[in-house]
Amino acid sequence: MELNEYVYSDCTIAPADGHFDAPQIYEDMRMADMLECIGLGEHPRLALEQSYEASEEAWTITTKDCRTVASFGVTQSDKAKDVGIIWLLGTYRIHNIKRTFIKHSKEWVGRLMGDYKALTNIVCESNELSVRWLTWLGATWSDVGIDNYKQFTIYKSERTSSSSDSLKQLN
């Protein structure tokens, strides 16, 4: 899979370099993301490092002044080969690019979907911003047996497939 840099008016999305990006995200990670990791029994720094290591595709968002905003990626589920585990951990700077983030997030979900039938992960219910955004992306919700956490699943649709095509056309 060819990995390119995507330049928007207020940010750039480029292939992630976990060794470089992880410390920058960790030092200014959103509290909601930190608490979510801790609630699942992972130190936020380790969760971030493990996310990079496990990902078959990972990206980092930076502002025009080269400040790291967030990283995200996908890895194949151990339980089902046609399901991807999607992740995103970010800093407070995500608010500085919120319009671009919202405008292009469905395209990026379509790209990460690739050949998977669905993308999934777990989110803390108190992470209201993430819950609203995932619901807007079309996520369905189910219980996971962990207090205050829900599993979300985004299923492949014609819409997510065609959204990723517009990313391909940018390059």
Image (cartoon, rainbow, N blue to C red):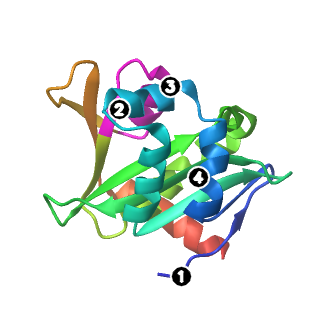
Q: CA distance from mark 1 to mark 3?
A: 32 Å
Q: CA distance from mark 3 to mark 2?
A: 10 Å
- Decide if residue 45 is on the left or right side of residue 152: right
Residue 58 in view (yes/no): yes
Give the labeled residue for mark 4: 22
The image shows residue 155 at horizontal and vertical percentages of 27, 50
SS for dot 2: strand
In this picture, which residue range is highlighted in magenta?
A: 122-138
Alpha carbon separation for disc pair 3 and 4 = 17 Å
Q: Is residue 116 above or below residue 141?
A: below
Q: Which mark is residue 113?
A: none
| Left or right of 166, for residue 134 | left
- What percent of the width, then of the height, locates residue 103? 62, 45
Q: Of the two numbered discs 2 and 4 on the same chain, state the one appearing first in sequence.
A: 4
The quadrant in which residue 3 appears is: bottom right
Q: Using the numbered discs, state the Cα–Cα distance from disc 4 to disc 1 in whole angstroms.
A: 22 Å
Residue 123: numbered disc: 2
Q: Amino acid at mark 4?
A: Ala
Q: Earlier in the sequence, mark 1 or mark 3?
A: 1
Q: Amino acid at mark 1?
A: Glu
Residue 110 or residue 10, whichever sits in front: 10
Residue 2 shows which numbered tag? 1
CA distance for labels 2 and 4: 20 Å
Circle 3 is placed at which residue position? 32
In the rendered image, which quarter contains the C terminus?
A: bottom right
Amino acid type of the residue that numbered disc 2 sits on in the rendered structure? Val
User: Which numbered disc flags the more N-terminal residue, 4 or 1?
Assistant: 1
